Amino acid sequence: MSAMPTLLTVRTQRFGDLQVSEEDRLRLLRPLAGFPETRHLLRLVLERQEPFVWLQSAEEPSVAFACAPCSWVRPGFVLEWPVWDRELWGEGSATEVLALVSFQKGPAANLAAPLVLEHGNRRALQVLNQAHGFGFAEPLLLQRG
Amino acid sequence: MLVLSRRRGESLKLGDDIEITILRAATGQVSLGIVAPRTLPVLRGELAAALSSGNLAALQFLPEKEVLVNLGSAKKEDLS
């Protein structure tokens, strides 16, 4: 008989209290720039919002990012890893590459520093993309004249 | 802030693992050689600031559910 996973309560500002198991948390290999307290992320998929997903900080209730798959934002998206991120990541393929989406000046996606997730090993890393042509705030929709 | 003066060819050590050497100093510009662990990001200050502000921007004006639903539909039209 397998042991029941221990559930943790994660307080969030946007989604209320969430009951999650240890296995639901993705460990950040390096804190996100600007958010040194956040060490783990919860990946949340909400009804009707796909392909958008939310990454909620397990440590900071007010920190939740709306994200979208980079290749959905820009078909032909390319991620080139800098040497320091490649060294830190080591072996293992990315399961998902997500762009943080901002809404300051119309919806825009950060393709310059996407979050790479590996679900199997429950880890995540923000990678500074070395490929040219992908900025910190790429319009999510085509600019229509 | 600690302020140190160094000449060309001289260096600084930060802890055991990081060494910064002044390679060239010309008017208004300094070239640095940096030895650091391969897992340590070495970024120009302006790029590090852009990285932080990009993350912080993503926390402002968080969308309501319907905004994402509508955005998903609009993007689908873009891609078709």
Image: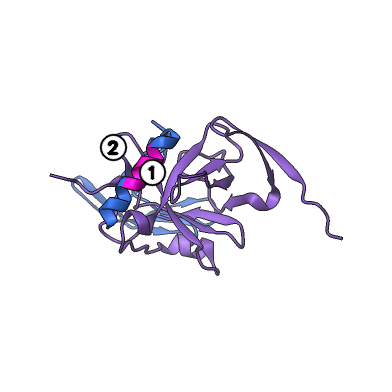
Q: Colour of chain A?
A: purple
Going by the numbered disc 2, the residue's amino acid type is Gly
In the rendered structure, the answer to whether residue A121 lies left or right of residue A133 reads right
Going by the numbered disc 1, the residue's amino acid type is Val
Q: Residue A14: percent from the left, percent from the top? A: 53, 32
Q: Which residue is mark 2?
A: A106
Q: Residue B11: percent from the left, percent from the top? A: 40, 54
Q: Residue furthest left?
A: A145
Q: Residue furthest bottom?
A: A91
| Quadrant hosting residue A137 | top left
Mark 2 in CB contact with mark 1 (< 8 angstroms)? no
- The quarter in which the C terminus of chain A is drawn is top left
Of B53 and A6, the residue lying toward us: A6
Residue at figure coordinates x 61%, y 63% from the top left: A120
A11 shown above or below A130: above
Q: Chain of mark 1?
A: A
Q: Chain of mark 2?
A: A
Residue at figure coordinates x 57%, y 38% from the top left: A37
- How packed mark 1 is, by other alpha carbons closer than 10 Å (few <14, some 14-19, many 20 or more), is many
Of B61 and A37, the residue lying toward us: B61
B60 shown above or below B35: above
Q: Which residue is mark 1?
A: A101
Residue range corresponding to the magenta coloring = B67-73
- How packed mark 2 is, by other alpha carbons closer than 10 Å (few <14, some 14-19, many 20 or more), is few
- Secondary structure mostly seen in the magenta stretch: helix
Residue at figure coordinates x 37%, y 64% from the top left: A80
Tag 2 secondary structure: loop
Q: Colour of chain B?
A: blue
Of B31 and A84, the residue lying toward us: A84
In the rendered structure, the answer to whether residue A61 lies left or right of residue B70 reads right
